[in-house]
């Protein structure tokens, strides 16, 4: 069975949890958003270039 803690201790534990979670998010958030931005900055133009080259170089089969 779980030990019963006083209400003040439970409130302080929740506040401490939120403080630690906000610290972790403030560290991980910019890293994650930077990686997503880098993906959109590099992958989207490459995909557009690939599809343009693929579209422009389609071989049309001519039957004589």
Image (cartoon, helix red, strand yellow):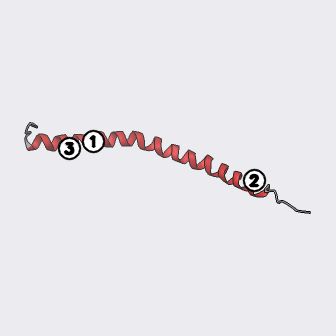
Tell me: 27 left or right of 49: left
Q: Mark 3 points at which residue?
A: 14
Q: Position of residue 21 (x, y in %)?
A: 31, 42
Tell me: 50 left or right of 57: left
Quadrant where the image shows the C terminus: bottom right
Q: Which residue is drawn at 20% across and 43% down?
A: 14
Q: Residue at x 16, y 41 (%)?
A: 12
Decide which of 51, 25 is in the foreground and name it.
51
What is the total number of numbered labels drawn onto the structure image? 3
Tell me: 58 left or right of 27: right
Task: Indicate which disc, 2 or 1, sits on the residue closer to the N terminus.
Answer: 1
- Position of residue 32 relative to residue 59, above or below, is above
Can you tell which of label 3 and label 2 is closer to the viewer? 2
Tell me: 62 left or right of 13: right
Q: Position of residue 46 (x, y in %)?
A: 67, 49
Can you tell which of label 2 and label 1 is closer to the viewer? 2
Q: Name the residue under label 1.
A: 19
Q: Residue furthest right?
A: 64
Decide which of 1, 6 is in the foreground and name it.
1
Residue contact at pointers 2 and 1, CB within 8 angstroms: no
Can you tell which of label 3 and label 1 is closer to the viewer? 3
Q: Which residue is drawn at 67% across and 54% down?
A: 48
Circle 2 Cα neighbour tier, 10 Å, few/some/many (<14 / 14–19 / ≥20): few
SS under mark 2: helix
Q: Mark 2 points at which residue?
A: 53
Q: Splitting the image into 4 quarters, where does residue 52 fall?
A: bottom right
Task: Indicate which disc, 3 or 2, sits on the residue closer to the N terminus.
Answer: 3
Q: How far apart are marks 3 and 1 (CA)?
A: 9 Å
Q: Distance between the residues labelled 3 and 2?
A: 56 Å
């Amino acid at each position: 069975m779980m030990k019963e803690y006083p209400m003040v201790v439970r409130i302080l534990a929740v506040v401490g949890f939120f403080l630690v979670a906000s610290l972790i998010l403030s560290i991980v958030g910019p890293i994650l958003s930077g990686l997503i931005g880098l993906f959109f900055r590099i992958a989207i133009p490459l995909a557009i270039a690939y599809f343009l080259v693929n579209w422009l170089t389609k071989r049309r089969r001519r039957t004589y």
